[in-house]
Image (tube, grey):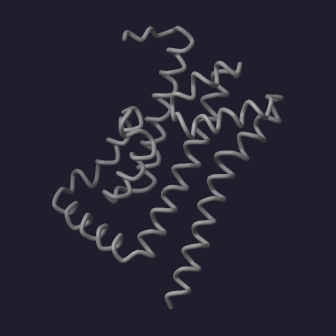
Amino acid sequence: MESSRVIDGVRKGFRAIAIAFVVATLIPVVLALLLSVPVGRVLSLIVTTLILQANAAFVGLSLGLNPLFILVVMTLTEVGIVLAIYEILDVFAETSERVRRFTKSTEAKMEKYPILHRYGAATLIILPMLPVIGLYSSVVIGWLLRWNKLQSIFFVTLGWVLVTGFLLLVALGFIRAIF
């Protein structure tokens, strides 16, 4: 029984990697090929997005990429990573007794606050914009608080598009950042 759970966990882990690869890398590369954009630049933008998150918008512009193309590639990268993180967290919940107990405890606590459970995922719009929390932590927060997965992905992505679009406007000089 234990070995089948481990095998299932490994299989789901590979599924997470496949999702991340297809959505975050393969689709942007195919899009680049279709639009005659140098693949090396797109791969650089993807890697930079993984490291710098929304700040990769500045790198994309310095690579000479179209702002709309940058937004699309960075959003695909974000969606791929968000989906993969959810898959990995689900594997941990299924294979680890400690994580399972923790999530059950969190679910019990969330039942005391039905409005937060129902509308809490909307708060994920602002979390990708916060430097300390950012994209990766916002996914984990939504998962830990057991918010609706589809809503959480939607609101994290909406926040991501807003912050990336804002940074592109700053980099293009349409918005002046005062610091």
* In the displayed structure image, the side of residue 80 where residue 128 appears, left or right: left
In the rendered image, which quarter is residue 51 located in? Answer: top right
Q: Which residue is drawn at 52% across and 62% down?
A: 87
Q: Residue at x 36, y 77 (%)?
A: 97
* In the displayed structure image, the side of residue 36 where residue 5 appears, left or right: left
Q: Residue at x 21, y 57 (%)?
A: 114
How many numbered discs, if any?
0
User: How far across and down, in percent of the image, does residue 128 sit?
Assistant: 41, 37
Residue 64 vertical placement versus 151 (above, below): above
User: How far across and down, in percent of the image, does residue 30 sit?
Assistant: 78, 41
Quadrant (top left/top right/bottom left/bottom right) for the C terminus: top left
Q: Name the residue furthest bottom.
A: 1
Q: Nearer the viewer, residue 78 or 7?
A: 7
User: How far across and down, in percent of the image, does residue 108 sit?
Assistant: 21, 67
Q: Residue at x 59, y 80 (%)?
A: 7
In the rendered image, which quarter is residue 62 located in? Answer: top right
* In the displayed structure image, the side of residue 159 where residue 22 appears, left or right: right
Q: Name the residue furthest front.
A: 51
* In the displayed structure image, the side of residue 147 where residue 10 appears, left or right: right
Q: Nearer the viewer, residue 106 or 122?
A: 106
Residue 46 vertical placement versus 1 (above, below): above
Residue 50 vertical placement versus 179 (above, below): below
User: How far across and down, in percent of the image, does residue 36 sit?
Assistant: 83, 29
